[in-house]
Image: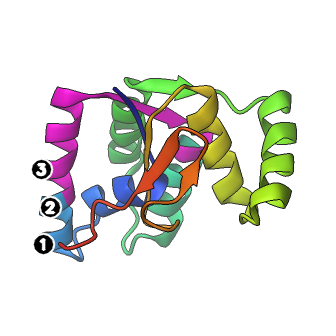
Amino acid sequence: MRVFVDTKLWVYRLDRREPQKSAFIRDWLRGLAREHEIVVSTQVLIELRAVLTRKFKPPLSADDTRLALEALAAFDVVATDTHLVLDAHELALREQLAWFDALIVEAAIRSHCDLLFSEDMSHGRQFGSLTVRNPLVGM
């Protein structure tokens, strides 16, 4: 099964300020990778870099940031192109989604994912055959 993993979950994996959450996500991602095909988008890579270099205190080093980006780039990466942006615009209007959430949902739909793992959207929400799941529910 193809599954899309949103940015914040990757951030939690690397954030040492919350060791319990980081360890949980690390183990969860390992299991997910063994059982499913993980998909991310260029947006996820861009957002992850921004967080690691500007929001982490202290910021991750340039080398560690590069390693994190290379690790994500090893998965299937959906490019954010003109058509994705235009379709995400329509999706945002139709579904009352925040703009960046609509871009993520549209990338997951385009890449034929069954599940979108995210903490930012309602657990169980459906977008056609795509279902949103929050792996932290019940943690």
In the figure, is residue 118 to the left or right of 127? left
Quarter of the rendering containing residue 57: bottom left
In this view, the residue in front, 91 or 81, is: 91
Disc 2, SS:
helix
Residues drawn in magenta: 25-44
User: To which residue does mark 1 refer?
Assistant: 20
Q: Tell me the crowding category of disc 1: few under 14, some 14 to 19, or many 20 or more residues within 10 angstroms, Cα based.
A: few
Q: Position of residue 82 (x, y in %)?
A: 85, 31
Under mark 1, the amino acid is: Gln
Q: Quadrant of the C terminus?
A: bottom left
What main secondary structure does the magenta stretch of the protein show?
Answer: helix
Disc 3, SS:
helix
Residue 127 — which label?
A: none
User: To which residue does mark 3 refer?
Assistant: 27
Whether tag 3 and tag 2 are in contact, CB under 8 A, the answer is yes
Whether tag 2 and tag 1 are in contact, CB under 8 A, the answer is yes
Under mark 3, the amino acid is: Asp
Residue at x 72% of width, y 63% of height: 97
